[in-house]
Image (cartoon, rainbow, N blue to C red):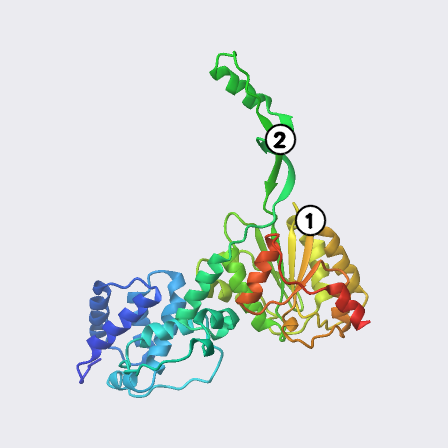
Amino acid sequence: MTDPSGKLSENILYFARALRAAGIPVGPGAVLDALEALSVARIGDREDFYWTLHAVFVKRHEHSILFDQAFQLFFRKRGYIEKLLAAMLPETPTTATKAPPPGAQRIQEALFAGMKEREEKSEVEVDARLTVSDREVLQKKDFAQMTTAEIAAAKEAIARLALPLDLVRTRRMAASRHGHLIDIRRTLRASMKAGGALIDLKYLGPREKEPPIVALLDISGSMSQYTRLFLHFLHSITDAKKRVTTFLFGTRLTNVTRAIRQRDPDEALAACSAHVVDWSGGTRIASSLRAFNKQWARRVLTQGAVVLLITDGLERDADDTLEFEIDRLHRSCRRLIWLNPLLRFDGFEARAKGVKTILGHVDELRPIHNLDSMTELVRALSGEPAKDYDAKAMLKKAA
């Protein structure tokens, strides 16, 4: 491939810088290898050009998604980028509008950051009482609408949402100053240091442990956007210390605990989406809860587990089965917290049969749609006072 305008090396260099900013390790040597590969391979079309750069820049499988989005956005950009690449790709094919894949927003900003000159802004004095801080805006903004900088700020905000779960006592004993049982082994070891002349009694007390968290997320058409939002939160709190088990359900139940443990949040959400086949479909809460109670309840609902049920309660097949399954789930766990995004509406009332059925078997009822609601949830899980909706009062009002 020839480059009459002499801009090929500049384009490849800029593209490599964008990949490095997006998280792919690309050095100067890779840029030289890419230029040499393009000159030797005699690229004839867009696909050959794509795979030549892919072979040089991508060294790990998990970087393929970022590279693909970077390449697509680089050649789809109008204006300045299109003029630079006119010599290499005279025609840029248009694609149908579709939902942005994972990491698209981050890649787009990494590619085109700094291309437009900064415009001089005149200083304007504004009354502070009429402004809203960036933090307040971030607390109420949907994750799907956030830019790269806002996602980074949201991650920091979520990281500050420490999750010191309300500890529960186990049957095992541990060393304790205020215990009620004498630890014979530790007492004898301590007395041997003084030659047996002094016996310092050591005690055992009940051992406290963080309870596991089990999340059941509705991925039906009316809940998919809120489920994606909450998956970011679950990804941030899922680590080696906290036992977090995640299930997705629409018309069937899917365990995505392993998929959500990936380090990159975009890759984790993409892996979760790949594991389910009923995303944005119908809702069968009763059959999904039946599958959970039969196959997973005894495995994950141990040591005082806390269950987070995230659904709007709009059951597709409303019958008496839902009441039996939700009651069984409630009896099997320590706390059952229902997170319903419809509570963000002031006029929400429990009119649907599924909503009324679930209301009678939950310990707490909370909204979940932004960082503010997550903060309240963390407070509730930590045993701190937090705003709550009275499920029994709402059920009486609906009756």
Looking at the rendering, in which quadrant would you find the C terminus?
Answer: bottom right
The residue depicted at 36 percent of the width and 69 percent of the height is 67
Q: Earlier in the sequence, mark 2 or mark 1?
A: 2
The residue depicted at 52 percent of the width and 17 percent of the height is 191
Q: As displayed, is residue 159 above or below residue 38?
A: above
x%, y% of residue 237? 52, 56
Q: Amino acid at mark 1?
A: Arg
Looking at the rendering, in which quadrant would you find the N terminus?
Answer: bottom left
Residue 341 visible in this rendered orientation of the protein: yes
x%, y% of residue 363? 71, 58
Instruction: Say the numbered circle drawn on residue 298.
Output: 1
Classify residue 395 by image quadrant.
bottom right
Instruction: Say the numbered circle drawn on residue 288.
Output: none
Q: Secondary structure at mark 1?
A: helix
**As drawn, is 274 to the left or to the right of 294?**
left
**As drawn, is 399 to the left or to the right of 44?**
right
Classify residue 208 by image quadrant.
top right
The residue depicted at 24 percent of the width and 69 percent of the height is 34
Q: As displayed, is residue 11 above or below residue 253?
A: below
Q: Are marks 2 and 1 in contact (CB under 8 Å)?
A: no
The front one of 393 and 170 is 393
Q: Nearer the viewer, mark 2 or mark 1?
A: 2
The front one of 358 and 25 is 358
Q: Which residue is mark 2?
A: 179
Disc 1 crowd, CA 10 A, few/some/many (<14, 14-19, 20+): few
Disc 2 crowd, CA 10 A, few/some/many (<14, 14-19, 20+): some
Classify residue 202 by image quadrant.
top right
x%, y% of residue 241? 52, 47
The Cα atoms of the two marked residues, 2 and 1, are separated by: 31 Å
The front one of 185 and 53 is 185
Q: Amino acid at mark 2?
A: Gly
